[in-house]
Image: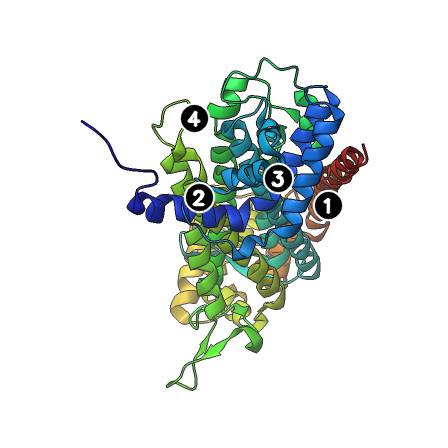
Amino acid sequence: MTDTSTFPDPTYRDTVLAPLFESVKAHHAADMGAINRAHLVMLAETGILNAADAAALAGALRDIEAETDIDALSYTGEYEDYFFLVEAELCKRLGDLGGALHTARSRNDMDHTLFKLALRRRAVAMMGQVTALTEALIDKAEREADTLIVAYTHGQPAQPTTFGHYLGAMIEVLQRDTVRLAAAMDGLDHCPMGAAAITTSGFPIDRARMAELLGFDGPLLNSYGCIASVDYVTGLYSAMKLIFLHLGRIVQDMQVWSSFEVGQLYVPNSLVQISSIMPQKRNPVPIEHLRHLASATVGRCDMVVGVMHNTPFTDMNDSEGEVQQAGYTAFDSGGRVLALLTALLPACSINGPRVRRNTDAACITITELADTLVRDEGLSFRQAHEVAAATARQVIADEVPLDEGFGAFRAAFTKVAKRASSTNEDAFKTAVAPETFVARRDRPGGPAPAALAAALEVYRATLAATKNAEAAREARYAAADTMLDAAFAALLET
């Protein structure tokens, strides 16, 4: 059988090669240029290429980059992809010498290096947004340290706390998510270059120098793993997913709290849309956008990880261009969530009168009454719980605030304890006041002023350490860019 077909088949060209070419234009062309320059510097420094050949290649690379309008390129199928287009240009200008740049490397180690460079740039930007949100939340928590709210469990009013205390819980989760993101970013910081196809090279390459020139912390050691182990992808998207899964739970609280029936969270007019037909309706639709964008980000992260499920432990397209490009959309939607939440949450405020009404209506301070009876009246907690429960039932039935339920309390106490209570009305009102409830929760992690202030100091210190570590990482990247520019310029001067 004679096969007269030629590559690429038009359908394959249009459905696979052309979209991948557009992806490289959008996401990887500059990084490919950096890899080309770094590899050429390394080949020259190790003597694999002589100085004259390296200088000629450097000049051609410089001219190709200067003369090529990446955005204007369209895929024709003449060359398989952008890599081969650049190599063809080198050969047009230098003859056979143009092919020497590919000595001791493969598309395999180049591709995974490209992906790491693109991912680390996006991850750095996301980390900056996460730390900005964390800082905004700490600032807000400090301002709202004494602002009472109703805390809910199982969807029902439970106990009073402060908005600052609630935000502290959010901050702690976000900082743990930050640790996971930073660890995933560490997984991006080892360079695959030098692995070549999968077993390194017979040439005396300097893998550490390649890593240094591209800003990596060092080479990824096992060459098979450089090509086959894509845990740098699955680890990063798994860490990202948790950020937006956890933020989505906060967003859901915001939706409930801002509802008319609950009404303890006030969203300012600048972030509210009015119904086109119902003029009384204030729709805090940014909260809805936050929820669906967070969910979309979680789904996109899951998609990336899911694509790699049950794939062979080797070089496979499943982990390469198509899925990488699709994964970048998770950074886009996730970045929108972080930016919007950083603007929205600090702008919101607590509706104090509504909090007070809900506190009274649901008797959410009753736990402290029970605790007070244990401390001051010598009851067992079970007896105290029974007195408190009977008191709450009566005031709810009477539709009066708890602090007006002294008569109900005295009757319940006498019935349970078989004696009169020594607690007077003023002491009763103090015990059931939300301010008392909060002030007495002064153990580490509680909402009392000193406990919350101590926690906020810890959050500040943790944030500072994170920012310092990320500044060092970014400084390494910037220093590598300067180093590569200088080393490449030196080739041109040879």
Give the tally of numbered discs: 4
Q: Earlier in the sequence, mark 2 or mark 3?
A: 3
In this view, the mark in front (1 or 2):
2
**Disc on the earlier residue, 4 or 3:** 3
Quadrant in the picture for the N terminus: top left
Furthest toward the top, the residue is 202
Q: Is residue 64 visible?
A: yes
Using a 10 Å C-alpha cutoff, classify the residue at mark 2 as few (fewer than 14 neighbours), some (14 to 19) or many (20 or more). many
Q: Nearer the viewer, residue 35 or 460?
A: 35
Describe residue 128's horizontal placement relative to residue 465 as left or right. Answer: left
* Of marks 1 and 3, the one in the foreground: 3
**Spatial CA span between label 1 and label 2:** 35 Å
Residue type highlighted by circle 1 = Ala
Question: Residue at image x 41%, y 81%?
Answer: 275
Name the residue that disc number 1 marks: 454
Mark found first going from the N terminus, 4 or 2:
2
Residue of label 3: 93
Q: Which residue is mark 2?
A: 301
Q: Earlier in the sequence, mark 4 or mark 1?
A: 4
**CB-based contact (under 8 Å), mark 2 and mark 3:** no
Considering every residue shown, the one lying at the far left of the view is 1
Find numbered disc 2 in the image and state the secondary structure of the residue it sits on.
helix
Disc 4 to disc 1, C-alpha distance: 51 Å
Residue in the foreground of this view, choosing between 273 and 483: 483
Check disc 4 and give the amino acid type. Asp
Q: Which residue in the protein does label 4 denote?
A: 315
Q: CA distance from mark 1 to mark 3?
A: 67 Å
| For discs 2 and 3, the disc positioned in front in the rendered view | 3
State the SS at label 4.
Answer: loop
Q: Residues within 10 Å of mark 1 (few under 14, many from 20)?
A: few
- In the structure shown, which secondary structural element does the residue marked by tag 1 occupy? helix
Q: CA distance from mark 4 to mark 3?
A: 32 Å
